[in-house]
Amino acid sequence: MACGRTTRTENGIPPKTVSDWFAIAVGGKTVHLQLAIQAAEMERGLMERRELAPDQGMLFVYREPTAMSFWMRNTPLSLDIGFFSPEGELKEVYAMQPFDEMPIRSRDSRLQFALEMNQGWFRKHGIKPGARFDLAALRESLKARGAFPEEFGLR
C-alpha cells in the first residue's frame, strides 16, 4: 500500500508530520493547514482539539476522487467543511456541530480534498463554490511531509 511510502524528503531532512503547518492559499486567502494524508491521521482529524487560530485548519488529502463523509465524534469545535475536486475547486461547504455523530455526506462523488476550518470561515472570507486552492503549494507541502504528490494525482 502506498501509505507506507511517506518517508523521504529531497534534501535529507526528516519529513514533517501532521502536527506541522503549511501556508496554502484558498480562494486567494492564505491559511495555515495541517495535512492529514495517512489513514490514522484522517481518522483522528481534529478530534479533541479545543481551538484553532482564525486562519488555521486541516486539509484531508485523498489519493483518488471519491464521495466524502465526515462526522464530529469527539470534536468540541464548531467547524465548516469544504469539499474540493481533484482540480482544487471548491464544490460544497457544510457547517458541522460539536460532537455531532450524524455524517455530513457530499453530493458529488468526484472529490479529492476536504478542508476543515472554524465555522463561518468560508462565509467570512467570501470563499464560495468555484473558488480554488493552490495546488502547487499543496504539492510542495506533500513533499515536505515526505509524500509523493503523484500518488495523490498531483503532477
Image: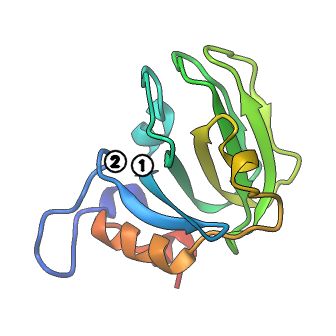
Q: Which residue is mark 1?
A: 38
Q: CA distance from mark 2 to mark 1?
A: 9 Å
Viewer-side label of 2, 1: 2
- Number of callouts in the render? 2
What x and y, as percent, mark residue 145?
Answer: 30, 62
What x and y, as percent, mark residue 57?
Answer: 50, 45
Q: Is residue 8 above or below residue 67?
A: below
What x and y, as percent, mark residue 100?
Answer: 68, 15
Q: Which numbered disc flags the more N-terminal residue, 2 or 1?
A: 2
Rendered image coloring scheme: rainbow
Q: Residue at 61%, 23% (x, y): give it.
A: 72
Q: Which residue is mark 2?
A: 18
Q: Residue at 24%, 58% (x, y): give it.
A: 16
Numbered label attached to residue 66: none
Tell which residue pokes out farthest to the front in this image: 124
**Whether label 2 touches label 1, CB < 8 Å:** yes
Q: Quadrant of residue 39?
A: top left
* 98 vs 45, nearest the viewer: 98
Disc 1 marks a residue whose amino acid type is Gln
What x and y, as percent, mark residue 26?
Answer: 61, 64
- Quadrant including the N terminus: bottom left
Mark 1 burial class by Cα count in 10 Å: few <14, some 14-19, many 20+: some
Relative to 110, 50 lies left or right: left
Disc 2 marks a residue whose amino acid type is Val
Tell which residue pokes out farthest to the right in this image: 107
| Element type at mark 1 | loop
Q: Residue at 34%, 54% (x, y): give it.
A: 21
Q: Residue at 67%, 67% (x, y): give it.
A: 27
